[in-house]
Image (cartoon, rainbow, N blue to C red):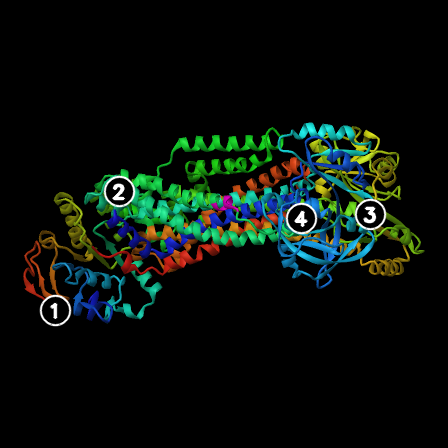
């Protein structure tokens, strides 16, 4: 069974007079352990797709199923719980709370979920250690470099052990060295923990790290191909049944 | 510049709520100043015009020491003195006018010589004709209008000789400031007034107009040399000063409340502009990058302030005018004079405008300068306002210095080193100091509070704390607004209740008797009512069921340069309480008064620095004479500038005549029958009959009308504070929109967002309200001490746990209610609108 799948997803913006159709019936299935990169020109609908996959935005029609649960059937609080426990988010601009330290930022989703502060901090430490940021745990975001902030954001996304991580241009605000380190970290998560990641990127070099590359154009999937991983499998092979 | 202005205009339009909140703050601030100042000015102008209507252009007045009528033969001699332009006899009495519904209206009746009066009072006949016959009367045009009286209508007046009628022959209105007339003034021919008040061949006073080239003092000395014993010549007796004295405490309360309203409004306006500019930092960065100069940035923000200030001021003027009418009506009820605004008084509007426009511009300048100083790259970078508002230890020192200055000013006022008017700036300095120091000490407070509340509220409390500290300048301002609202509200409310207790204690102790008979309710300013027909005291004494009858007479007099009111009565009982005695032996006081001693009001004691056992010199028929002071009493009649003595002594030494009120005690088991018989006589003479319960009811109504006015101003303070809170929280949310969206994305449910915003309100509430309770009690205590100069003694401060708890809980509930709208707004934010994947 697919971890997350979309069925005839459409999304329109604007009023009845000027309406823009951003997604035009997208069918997509992503399985556990996949590292999917979504590419496409600006306005092609890739970010909107990510918002809908994360339950942040509702589709105009169609549905999203995460682990078999239809997002359309959930109310706002249920969707919030789903995001909190099953989805991790990584943003281009990191989106850390500027007033909280690194460890407080990482522990935040747990504490909001009612986990005791001490336990939340213990788990946050493990998560920070995984991204090699434990030594900077007490620093506020303003005292961290961009790459470090993004690693803290990744630790925050991981702390709840999510089923899927949705990453929006995770290297977009970083220089090539720091970007490379973040990309490597994501690959490592997939490789070592079979973490499912869906990543939107403009950077073809970053997209090469993914096991599957989906190209978007004008609200539809233009191509969907498996990429050659380090072991030489799937590179360039089209995905059967992917919408075109 | 026009391009920039268009950008600003679009900013206004795109944020209608913020624009409205800023405007509302300016409007309320301006309205508070205009309404209070206008009402005080109108009240004073009315009192002044009442005085001027009576005194006109007269520079000197000749009266007897006990205000009894004296022979008019002296007038010719005075008129012959070099430098005297006009000398004319006048009858000046209080009477009662029965209006169309037979309601009593206390009026001042002036008996004048129509041929001479034009030299003294300047008025024109608006309708009808001048006095030409004995049955005619002139009435002030505005006063007649207020009663629905028309020209050529007959009027019914109560005089010493009973009910008299006259025909209104003319409605007059002033032609110059010196003759401005408001309120119940009726002018009749001199011989008629002499007859009505049993003063044939005599006059109550002689008014003297002096040649401009002559010195008043020189002429006064010449006249004094001519006067027989018992007559005195002075500059016009300002009996209305008693009214002014009586309203000082009310004015202080109103000024204090108005000052605090303004202070809160200033905070809100500054706060709003700070947030406004902070929010548009990036926009300014772009404009700077496109070539806009720093000066242009400053100019456009200041121009925004100017536009909002002008619009807010215009609306504030209108609201203030309406508020002034309400306050004037309450003040009028206290002073028993209809207060109307017949002349345009520009000063309150000018002050309101100055504050409205000035504060809006001042509120804009500082944030504007901050915005202009940023380089384009800095401005476009995402930086929290917190980086622009670092905590500064010097602010803490500045706060301590300001608060210390405030306390020293207050101590100075209490010790009477300087005028009581400085108490308001002193209190403001004290509070301002606390607010200036707050950003530095805020983290200490919030940390403790979060430690206490986080087991209950949870992570949301910590997030709320961080958000407040991030913008600690703004948070401090909001906390300051809440702090001022509660401390002022509690302080003033406590002080009002203390004053009410004091007034009640006074009338319960001083106004003892079963029945009170008068021509009309007395003036609180002078105690004077209206002359009653003679012979009534004797008639009441003849009623078998009556135990005791006492007559009261209030007469203006002097002790040296102090204007005082002599209160003469019989003091029949040796055991009854006649005074709300504050100093002196209550067991012997009645006997002491019968021995010739006097009891004085506490205000007079304070002003003249007199104590029990001291001597007070009074002008008598036999020249100046010292009276031993046996006691000092609290007195709300005649502003506490009262001197109590036995009627016998007053008649003998001061030639006091007439009666303002009669107080009757019935025999213990005959109250009902006595009441019926007394009431019958009162009705026959068209007099006002009141039982003690009815009288106390009327007094309570009077007190209530003033208190209502003050409560209204306090309510205004609370509303302004609530606006401030809604404003700040709304701005907080606007600024946190992105973060709230991010939190919603990763983990936060709507309920948790609400909880976080409530927590922000709760934290600000606790930080503000806990010290505000102590500050409020301190203000109440200081106000009770500062009553010295106005009431003549400190009013007992009472700690009211119930009121304190209610004020705290009420304000906290208001805070939480005010946070509901922003909290709901935050919870309803659409995540996709706030955090878009980039």
Mark 1: few, some, or many residues within 10 Å (few <14, many ≥20)?
Answer: some
**What percent of the width, then of the height, locates residue B734?**
34, 53
Inter-mark Cα distance, 1 to 3: 109 Å
Inter-mark Cα distance, 3 to 2: 75 Å
Mark 4 or 3, nearer chain start: 4
The reply to whether discs 3 and 2 touch (Cβ–Cβ < 8 Å) is no
Inter-mark Cα distance, 2 to 4: 54 Å
**Element class at badge 3:** loop
The one nearer the camera, B90 or B720, is B90
Inter-mark Cα distance, 2 to 1: 57 Å
Q: Nearer the viewer, mark 2 or mark 4?
A: 4
Q: Nearer the viewer, mark 2 or mark 1?
A: 2
Q: Which residue is mark 4?
A: B335
- Does the magenta segment cover residue B28? no
Q: Please tell me if label 1 and label 3 are on a single chain.
A: no
Q: Nearer the viewer, mark 4 or mark 3?
A: 3
Q: Which residue is mark 3?
A: B659
**Element class at badge 4:** helix
Q: Which residue is mark 1?
A: A242
Q: Nearer the viewer, mark 3 or mark 2?
A: 3
What range of the chain is rendered magenta? B345-349
**Element class at badge 1:** loop
Inter-mark Cα distance, 1 to 4: 90 Å
Q: Please tell me if label 4 and label 3 are on a single chain.
A: yes
Q: Which residue is mark 2?
A: B296
> On what subunit does the disc labeled 1 rest?
A
Q: Judge left or right: residue B808 versus residue B13.
A: right
């Amino acid at each position: 069974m697919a971890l997350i799948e979309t069925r005839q997803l459409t999304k329109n913006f604007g009023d009845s007079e000027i309406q823009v159709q951003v997604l035009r019936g997208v069918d997509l299935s992503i399985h556990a352990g996949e590292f999917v990169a979504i590419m496409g020109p600006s306005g092609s609908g890739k970010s909107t797709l990510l918002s809908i996959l994360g339950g942040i935005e509702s589709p105009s029609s169609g549905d999203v199923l995460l682990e078999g649960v239809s997002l359309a059937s959930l109310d706002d609080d249920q969707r919030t719980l789903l995001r909190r426990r099953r989805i991790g988010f990584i943003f281009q601009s990191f989106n850390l709370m500027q007033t909280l330290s690194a460890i407080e930022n990482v522990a935040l989703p747990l504490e909001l979920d009612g986990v005791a502060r001490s336990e939340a901090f213990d788990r946050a430490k493990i998560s920070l250690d995984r991204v090699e940021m434990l030594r900077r745990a007490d620093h506020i975001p303003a005292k961290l470099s961009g790459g470090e902030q993004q690693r803290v954001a990744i630790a925050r996304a991981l702390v709840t052990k999510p089923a899927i991580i949705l990453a929006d241009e995770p290297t977009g605000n970083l220089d090539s060295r720091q970007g490379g380190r973040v990309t490597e970290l994501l690959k490592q998560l997939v490789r070592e923990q079979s973490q499912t990641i869906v990543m939107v990127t403009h950077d073809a070099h970053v997209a090469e790290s993914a096991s599957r590359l989906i190209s978007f154009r004008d609200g539809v999937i233009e191509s969907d191909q498996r990429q050659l991983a380090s072991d030489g499998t799937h590179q360039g092979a089209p995905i059967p049944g992917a919408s075109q | 510049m026009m391009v920039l202005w268009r950008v600003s205009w679009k900013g206004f339009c795109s944020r209608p709520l913020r624009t409205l909140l800023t405007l509302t703050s300016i409007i309320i601030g301006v309205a508070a100043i205009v309404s209070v100042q206008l009402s005080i000015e109108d009240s004073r102008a009315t009192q002044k015009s009442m005085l001027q209507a009576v005194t006109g252009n007269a520079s000197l007045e000749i009266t007897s020491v006990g205000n009894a009528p004296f022979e008019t033969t002296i007038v010719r001699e005075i008129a012959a003195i070099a430098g005297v332009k006009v000398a004319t006899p006048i009858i000046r009495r209080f009477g009662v006018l029965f209006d169309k519904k037979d309601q009593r209206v206390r009026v001042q009746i002036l008996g004048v010589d129509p041929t001479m009066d034009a030299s003294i009072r300047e008025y024109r006949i608006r309708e009808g004709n001048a006095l030409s016959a004995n049955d005619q009367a002139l009435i002030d045009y505005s006063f007649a209008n207020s009663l629905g009286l028309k020209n050529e209508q007959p009027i019914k007046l109560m005089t010493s000789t009973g009910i008299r009628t006259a025909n209104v022959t003319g409605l007059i209105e002033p032609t110059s400031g010196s003759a401005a007339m408001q309120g119940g003034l009726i002018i009749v021919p001199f011989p008629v007034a002499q007859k009505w008040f049993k003063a044939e061949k005599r006059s109550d006073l002689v008014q003297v107009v002096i040649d401009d080239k002559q010195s008043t003092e020189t002429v006064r000395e010449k006249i004094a040399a001519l006067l027989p014993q018992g007559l005195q010549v002075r500059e016009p007796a300002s009996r209305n000063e008693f009214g002014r004295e009586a309203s000082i405490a009310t004015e202080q309360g109103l000024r204090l409340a108005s000052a605090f309203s303004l202070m809160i409004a200033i905070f809100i306006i500054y706060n709003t502009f700070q947030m406004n500019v902070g929010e548009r930092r990036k926009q300014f960065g772009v404009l700077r990058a496109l070539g806009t100069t720093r000066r242009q940035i400053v100019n456009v923000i200041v121009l925004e302030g100017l536009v909002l200030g002008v619009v807010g001021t215009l609306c504030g003027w209108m609201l203030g005018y309406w508020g002034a009418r309400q306050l004037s009506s309450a003040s009028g009820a206290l002073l028993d004079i209809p207060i109307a605004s017949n002349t345009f008084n520009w000063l309150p509007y000018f002050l309101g405008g100055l504050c409205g426009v000035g504060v809006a511009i001042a509120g804009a300048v500082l944030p504007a300068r901050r915005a202009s100083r940023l380089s384009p790259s800095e401005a476009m970078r995402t930086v929290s306002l917190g980086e622009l508002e670092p905590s500064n230890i010097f602010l803490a020192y500045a706060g301590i210095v300001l608060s210390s200055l405030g306390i020293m000013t207050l101590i100075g006022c209490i010790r009477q080193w300087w005028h009581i008017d400085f108490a308001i700036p002193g209190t403001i300095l004290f509070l301002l100091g606390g607010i200036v120091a707050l950003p530095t000490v805020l983290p200490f407070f919030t940390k403790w509070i979060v430690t206490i509340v986080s087991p209950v509220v949870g992570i949301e409390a910590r997030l709320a704390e961080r958000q407040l500290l991030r913008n600690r300048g703004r948070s401090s301002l909001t906390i300051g607004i809440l702090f001022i609202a509660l401390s002022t509200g509690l302080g003033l409310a406590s002080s009002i209740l203390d004053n009410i207790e004091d007034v009640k204690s006074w009338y319960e102790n001083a106004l003892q008797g079963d029945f009170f008979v008068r021509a009309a309710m007395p003036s609180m300013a002078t105690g004077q009512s209206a002359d009653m027909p003679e012979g009534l005291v004797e008639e009441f004494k003849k009623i078998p069921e009556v135990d005791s009858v006492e007559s009261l007479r209030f007469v203006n007099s002097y002790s040296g340069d102090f204007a005082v009111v002599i209160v003469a009565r019989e003091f029949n009982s040796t055991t009854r309480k006649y005074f709300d005695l504050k100093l002196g032996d209550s067991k012997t006081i009645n006997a002491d008064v019968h021995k010739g001693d006097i009891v004085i009001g506490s205000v007079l004691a304070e002003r003249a620095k007199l104590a029990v056992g001291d001597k007070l010199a009074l002008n008598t028929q036999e020249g100046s004479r010292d009276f031993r002071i046996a006691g000092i009493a609290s007195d709300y009649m005649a502003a506490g500038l009262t001197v109590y003595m036995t009627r016998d002594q007053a008649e003998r030494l001061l030639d006091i005549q007439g009666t303002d009120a009669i107080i009757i005690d019935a025999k213990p088991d005959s109250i009902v029958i006595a009441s019926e018989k007394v009431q019958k006589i009162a009705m026959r003479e068209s007099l006002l009959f009141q039982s003690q319960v009815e009288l106390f009811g009327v007094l309570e109504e009077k007190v209530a009308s003033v208190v209502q006015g003050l409560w209204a101003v306090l309510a205004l303070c609370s509303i302004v504070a609530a606006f401030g809170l809604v404003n700040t929280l709304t701005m907080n949310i606007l600024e946190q929109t992105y973060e709230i969206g991010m939190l919603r994305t990763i983990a936060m449910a709507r309920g948790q967002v609400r909880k976080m915003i409530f927590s922000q309100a709760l934290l600000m509430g606790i930080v503000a309200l806990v010290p505000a309770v102590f500050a409020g009690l301190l203000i109440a205590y200081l106000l009770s001490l500062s009553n010295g100069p106005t009431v003549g003694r400190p009013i007992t401060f009472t700690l009211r746990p119930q009121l304190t708890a209610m004020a705290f809980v009420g304000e906290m509930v208001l805070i939480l209610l005010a946070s509901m709208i922003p909290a709901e707004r935050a919870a309803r934010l659409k995540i996709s609108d706030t955090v878009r994947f980039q």
